[in-house]
Amino acid sequence: MVTRKKVVLITGGSRGIGAAAVTLLAERDYVVAINYKENHSAAKELVRSINAAGGQATEFQADISDENQVEALFSSVALRYGPITHLVNNVGVLAHQQRVESMTAERINYILQHNVTPYFICAREAVKHFKKQDDMSKCAIVNVSSAASRLGGANEYVDYAASKGAIDTFTIGLSLELAEYGVRVNCVRPGCIYTDIHRDGGEAERVSRLAPQLPLRRGGTASEVANAIVWLLSDEASFVTGSFIDLAGGK
Ligand code: NAP
């Protein structure tokens, strides 16, 4: 039996939720392309550990907010591994906690340029790769949104929450466009997960502060989100498209 090669690209795959998904996907015999922006040592260490465990991974530096760099990223991955078969749109950024009444256009545009436009551009490039497959119905995309898209991010990050609302809508629209090819597009919506993103938002201990207010009374882990990403990408989810999995401890 010929085993089909599964090549997955994970944007922002070197740390946090992306890195947890990278590790699980490598264990499940995906060839993994790990995108990162600045922290080469984190990306390199992840690649080293995967390859030491018998997996196959390479790190690819690219700023996902730059369309030219995204195009170059997809070309580099194809050169190394052939066309990708799976995409995890994972990069998301926060600015410091602030109310809407203080937000500048510069800040809002920064959020949208990182959290929304790249998801479209990466999906566009992924579809070009998918079209090179004999059977596109094995290809899939998972978008990483946030529980904030349902909750609104009041007093902290309404701009971020709105950008994730755009990703929810994007997931629905793209899933309908790609259904004719059999390509599935789904979305995960993490809640409070222990990663470095909260430090970037100005409150490193945010998850610990909010955990007692969650129905499950704790924050989540990157691995708990990664499990859902991996399942949605897999053939086990073959009849699932345009769907959302909330990983938010009940809120
Ligand atoms: P994180 O720990 O802050 O990881 C950030 C990752 O993204 C790193 O690999 C980083 O690479 C990369 N990155 C950042 N900017 C980039 C750019 N412009 N181009 C390419 N790569 C870039 O993030 P996370 O918490 O795992 O979040 C992952 C996703 O989950 C995001 O979409 C986030 O909105 C969503 N989410 C997270 C939570 C949570 O509580 N953590 C909750 C809801 C949703 P470098 O290190 O090289 O910069």
Image: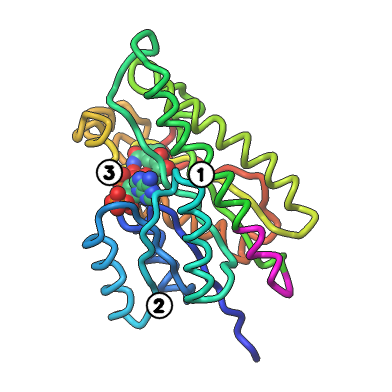
Amino acid type, residue under disc 3 in the picture:
Tyr
Query: Could you tell me residue 121's position as x and y percent?
Result: 57, 47
Secondary structure category for the residue under label 1: helix
Q: Residue 25: x and y, percent?
A: 44, 67
Please report contact status of discs 2 and 3: CB closer than 8 Å, yes or no.
no
Mark 3, residue position: 194
Residue at point 54%, 45% (across, down): 119
Q: Is residue 44 above or below residue 207?
A: below
Mark 3–mark 1 distance (CA, rounded to whole Å):
24 Å
Kindly indicate whether the residue at mark 1 contacts the one at mark 3 (C-beta within 8 angstroms): no
User: Mark 2 — residue?
Assistant: 56
Which one is closest to the eye, mark 3 or mark 1? 1
Foreground disc of the pair 2, 1: 1
State the residue lying farthest toward the front: 68
Q: Is residue 75 left or right of residue 218?
A: right
Q: Position of residue 81 (x, y in %)?
A: 50, 76
Name the kind of residue labelled 1 in the image: Pro
Q: Residues within 10 Å of mark 2 (few under 14, many from 20)?
A: many
Query: In the rendered image, which residue does mark 1 sit on?
Result: 118
Quarter of the image with the N terminus is: bottom right
In which quadrant of the rendered view does residue 234 lie? bottom right
Judged from the image, the secondary structure of the residue bearing numbered disc 3 is loop
| Span highlighted in magenta in the image | 126-135
Is 127 included in the stretch rendered in magenta? yes
